[in-house]
Image (cartoon, rainbow, N blue to C red):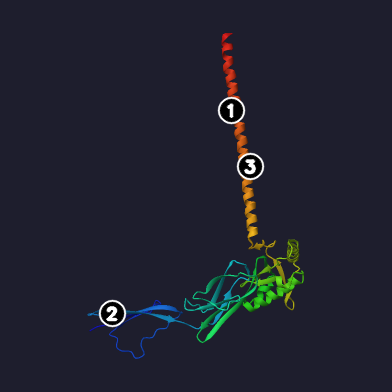
């Protein structure tokens, strides 16, 4: 009796066998990617058929993990955190997130979560993933503020030649840029952050984190000093002997103040409503005035018509 067996490995590959005898080592198949695969087998002959299914979890060792997170977060506003692993896994890992001062991790099967920081200051975020007999992790520090100012920076083209596009290099360059900025202003060291973006051309973000008790005049003065120094190409650093890099301002003005406090939102709303009501009042006054003028013109025309009608008999009687 002829018996056919079909095997579907769940990754787009399938094989068929006819009159297969016992194989001591079984049927071998190599999966090229990690994931969960649905493997099915179908056996059929003249007497009927039989099918069975199993789910196979194929894994591979994680070589590297990187945590992607913004450098500054607004207090009481959601922050998105993402973990990227190499090689890429598809829903086959468990992620352990250590957030702030929490003593217990948040566990997820996805490499992305959202979190809200409720207090100001520097917060540490660590993500861990278990692979084989080792645990890999990456850590980032996030400054949590009620408000901050942001300014985009660019650099003279010679910096791109030395950019290997690795995190360690970006951190080193960020520290050098911060040192150069502090030399042209008296901005407190702990209130200034520089974040260098991945990729080429090299770009960075300057983050100003003023304290609550600083006056608006003081904040504005420091911002103007930094912007002026950048606009005049006064901020520079030496990458290596003979290679000086100039830091430019990408935006001609500092980014607007980002504030999470409700009073600024309510003030803006009140101002908007005031403008709307003022516009509505002007429109109603204009409309009322136009209607009054129209009524007056109509009355004058009716009066003239009546006078003309009364004069007609006198004319005909002559």
> Which is nearer the eye, 193 or 88?
193
Which of the two discs, 3 and 2, labels the residue nearer the N terminus? 2
What numbered label is drawn on residue 282? 3
Q: Residue at x 58, y 16 (%)?
A: 310
Say how many tags the image has: 3
> Which is nearer the eye, 317 or 145?
145
Residue 269 placement (x, y as % from top left): 62, 54
Alpha carbons under labels 3 and 2: distance apart: 83 Å
Whether residue 244 can be seen here: no
- In which quarter of the view is residue 142 placed? bottom right
> Which is nearer the eye, 74 or 308?
74
Alpha carbons under labels 3 and 1: distance apart: 24 Å
Task: Examine the rendered structure and indicate whether residue 300 appears above or below residue 64.
Answer: above
Alpha carbons under labels 2 and 1: distance apart: 96 Å
The N terminus lies in quadrant: bottom left
- In which quarter of the view is residue 245 placed? bottom right
Secondary structure found at label 1: helix
Residue 38 placement (x, y as % from top left): 38, 77
Quickly name the residue at label 1.
298
Select label 3 or label 2 by which is in front: 3
Which of the two discs, 2 and 1, labels the residue nearer the N terminus? 2
Pointer 3 local density, CA inside 10 Å: few below 14, some 14–19, many at least 20 = few
Select label 2 or label 1 by which is in front: 1
Secondary structure found at label 2: strand
Residue 91 placement (x, y as % from top left): 47, 76
């Amino acid at each position: 009796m002829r018996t056919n067996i079909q095997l579907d490995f769940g990754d787009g590959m399938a094989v068929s066998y006819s009159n297969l005898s016992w194989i001591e080592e079984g049927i071998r198949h190599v999966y090229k990617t990690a994931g969960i695969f649905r493997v099915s087998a179908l056996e059929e002959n003249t007497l009927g058929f039989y099918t069975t299914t199993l789910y196979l979890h194929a894994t591979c060792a994680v070589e590297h993990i990187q945590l992607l997170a913004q450098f500054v977060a607004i207090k009481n506003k959601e922050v998105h955190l993402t973990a990227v692993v190499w090689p890429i896994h598809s829903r086959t890992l468990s992620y352990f997130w250590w957030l702030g001062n929490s003593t217990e991790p948040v566990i997820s099967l996805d490499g992305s979560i959202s979190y809200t920081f409720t207090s100001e200051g520097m917060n540490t975020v660590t993500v861990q993933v278990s692979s084989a007999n080792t645990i890999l992790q990456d850590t980032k520090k996030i400054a949590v503020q009620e408000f901050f100012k942001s300014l985009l920076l660019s650099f003279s083209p010679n910096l791109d030649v030395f950019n290997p596009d690795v995190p360690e290099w970006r951190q080193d360059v960020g520290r050098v840029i911060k040192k150069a900025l502090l030399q042209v202003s008296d901005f407190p060291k702990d209130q200034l952050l520089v974040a260098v973006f991945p990729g080429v051309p090299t770009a960075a973000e300057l983050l100003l984190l003023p304290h609550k008790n600083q006056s608006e005049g003081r904040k504005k003065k420091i911002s103007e000093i930094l912007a002026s120094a950048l606009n005049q190409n006064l901020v520079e650093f030496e990458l290596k002997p003979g290679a000086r890099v100039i830091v430019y301002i990408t935006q001609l003005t500092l980014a607007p103040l980002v504030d999470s406090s409700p009073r600024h939102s309510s003030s803006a709303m009140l101002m908007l409503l005031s403008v709307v009501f003022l516009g509505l009042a002007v429109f109603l006054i204009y409309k009322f005035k136009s209607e009054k003028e129209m009524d007056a013109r109509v009355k004058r025309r009716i009066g003239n018509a009546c006078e003309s009608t009364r004069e007609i008999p006198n004319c005909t009687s002559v």
